[in-house]
Image (spheres, helix red, strand yellow):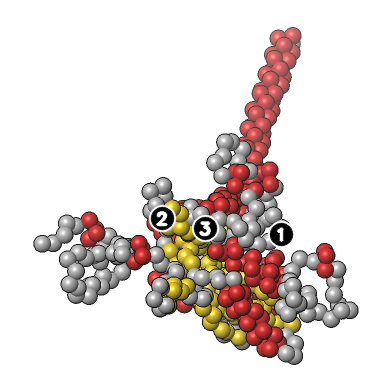
């Protein structure tokens, strides 16, 4: 009996130990599963947080915008532009701004996908927003632009095609892949550089056309009285600003003289920056009156009735707020741009879209096209109602006038007067290699016209390096 009792107790202890071992094993499994779930949850949260970080607009402070290490350009961001600023000084300011904008743009590297059930609704909302002023039917705004020449249109159009190619986008609103409406892609023939915006969006009132003509005449007077001759701008880079707006950014070129008396035309010119000077004069002639009071201000604020006028001391005219490169006093950066395309980020695709490849292509295209030049000597004074969307005032304007820059004349000793081409120097005209390198865009090669010259510029880039034919 005693042996049976001891045997039963032993079996009971064994069962207890076995039960404890089983519980311990279950506990270890539970801990292991919990740790795995925690790890997976941490990775998931980290991935989601990184996804949001890469997709959101980054609002950085001035302290964050500054270089944290030794910087070559940091002190250029504080340069103040005025009508006496030289080409070299203005270019240091504007190209510093371009670099900072490009660096900020790279933080926007992901566009979040949208549920297919919401996609079409958001896209219709995007179109309505783009055409909001046009849909009102009684709004317009006035702008001064310089149209891109045919070669520049071709260069920028091809650059846009190459940069946006990875998206494989469609203009079909029902598409689940990347979508860019036709309104957001500036037609090649409408590509332009914005010079100034004398009057932002306003309600059309009686006498509107007469006021527009008066403003166009004021701009003509500004060009003639201050002798704003034509000038050249040079392509600096192409950037997808904020991951949203594809733009071409420009700088000015001017003349400088070397120690041995040679004249060089480049970005380090010592003459007054023509774009900064032109914009400053346009603003001055529209918001101030002349000493003899014959020229009165032509702004929305001054044309308000006395009862509607706000405190003018606290008001900054829209021509200063909206004209590119102007802005608040001390913040002007000389910005010169051509808008190429706008991406509808809120409804781009049903899937996440990576923008890193687009940013890389922007850098490559910039390296290829940097230095391409365009002459600014013809302006268009346009009043539009917004039928062309946000960035295309050239589509069906209600007022459109072409205004040419004054020609530079040279009076010879015998009294004859000769009109000089002030936009292209003689040195540039004599260079046969100036112009686009042939076949860069894989286009059809056009044979050059027969010439009696002993040397030809060739139709392809490699032809430039071939020895002359005997």
Displayed quadrant of residue 458: bottom left
Question: In the current view of this chain or complex, which residue is farthest to the bottom?
Answer: 206
Mark 3–mark 1 contact, CB under 8 Å?
Answer: no
Residue 22 drawn above or below residue 5 = below
First of labels 2, 3 by sequence position? 2
Quarter in which the C terminus is drawn: bottom left
First of labels 3, 1 by sequence position? 3
- The residue at 47%/65% (across/down) is 232
Residue 50 is left or right of residue 246, and the answer is right
Q: Residues within 10 Å of mark 2 (few under 14, many from 20)?
A: some
**Residue of label 3:** 271
Residue 110 drawn above or below residue 299 = above
Instruction: Please identify, in this view, whether the residue under mark 3 or under mark 1 is nearer the observer.
Output: 3
First of labels 1, 2 by sequence position? 2
Question: In the current view of this chain or complex, which residue is farthest to the left?
Answer: 470
Residue 354 is left or right of residue 204, and the answer is left
**Residue of label 2:** 264
**Numbered mark located on residue 150 in the image:** none
**Residue of label 1:** 328
């Amino acid at each position: 009996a005693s042996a049976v009792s001891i045997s039963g107790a032993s079996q009971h202890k064994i069962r207890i130990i076995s039960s404890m071992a089983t519980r311990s094993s279950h506990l270890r499994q539970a801990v292991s599963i919990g740790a795995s779930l925690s790890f997976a949850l941490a990775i998931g949260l980290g991935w989601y947080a990184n996804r949001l970080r890469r997709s959101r607009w980054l609002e950085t402070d001035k302290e964050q915008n500054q270089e944290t290490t030794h910087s070559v350009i940091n002190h250029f961001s504080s340069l103040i532009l005025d009508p006496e600023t030289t080409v070299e000084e203005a270019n240091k300011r504007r190209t510093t701004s371009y670099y900072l904008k490009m660096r900020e743009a790279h933080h926007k590297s992901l566009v979040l996908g949208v549920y297919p059930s919401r996609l079409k609704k958001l896209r219709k909302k995007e179109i309505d927003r783009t055409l909001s002023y046009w849909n009102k039917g009684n709004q317009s705004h006035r702008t001064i632009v310089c149209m891109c020449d045919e070669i520049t249109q071709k260069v920028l159009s091809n650059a846009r095609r190459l940069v946006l190619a990875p998206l494989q986008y469609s203009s079909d609103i029902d598409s689940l892949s990347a979508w860019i409406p036709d309104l957001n892609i500036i037609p090649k023939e409408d590509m332009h550089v914005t010079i100034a915006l004398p009057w932002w969006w306003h309600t059309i009132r009686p006498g509107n056309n007469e006021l527009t003509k008066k403003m166009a005449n004021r701009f003509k007077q500004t060009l003639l009285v201050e002798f704003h001759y034509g000038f050249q701008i040079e392509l600096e880079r192409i950037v997808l600003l904020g991951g949203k707006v594809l733009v071409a950014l420009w700088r000015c070129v001017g003349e400088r003289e070397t120690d041995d008396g040679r004249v060089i035309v480049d970005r380090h010119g010592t003459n007054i920056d023509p774009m900064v000077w032109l914009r400053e004069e346009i603003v001055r002639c529209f918001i101030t009156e002349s000493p003899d009071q014959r020229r009165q201000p032509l702004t929305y604020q001054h044309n308000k009735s006395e009862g509607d006028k706000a405190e003018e001391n606290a008001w900054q005219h829209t021509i200063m707020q909206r004209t590119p490169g102007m802005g608040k006093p001390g913040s002007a950066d000389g910005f010169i741009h051509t808008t190429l395309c706008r991406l509808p980020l809120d409804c781009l695709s049903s899937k996440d879209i990576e923008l890193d490849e687009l940013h890389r292509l922007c850098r490559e295209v910039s390296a290829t096209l940097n230095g391409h030049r365009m002459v600014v000597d013809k302006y268009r004074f346009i009043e539009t109602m917004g039928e062309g969307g946000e960035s295309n005032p050239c589509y069906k304007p209600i007022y459109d006038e072409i205004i040419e820059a004054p020609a530079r004349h040279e009076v010879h000793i015998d009294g004859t007067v000769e009109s000089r081409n002030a936009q292209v120097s003689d040195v540039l005209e004599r260079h046969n290699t100036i112009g686009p390198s042939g076949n860069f865009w894989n286009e059809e090669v056009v044979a050059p016209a027969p010439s009696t010259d002993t040397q030809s510029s060739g139709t392809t880039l490699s032809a430039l390096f071939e020895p002359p034919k005997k």
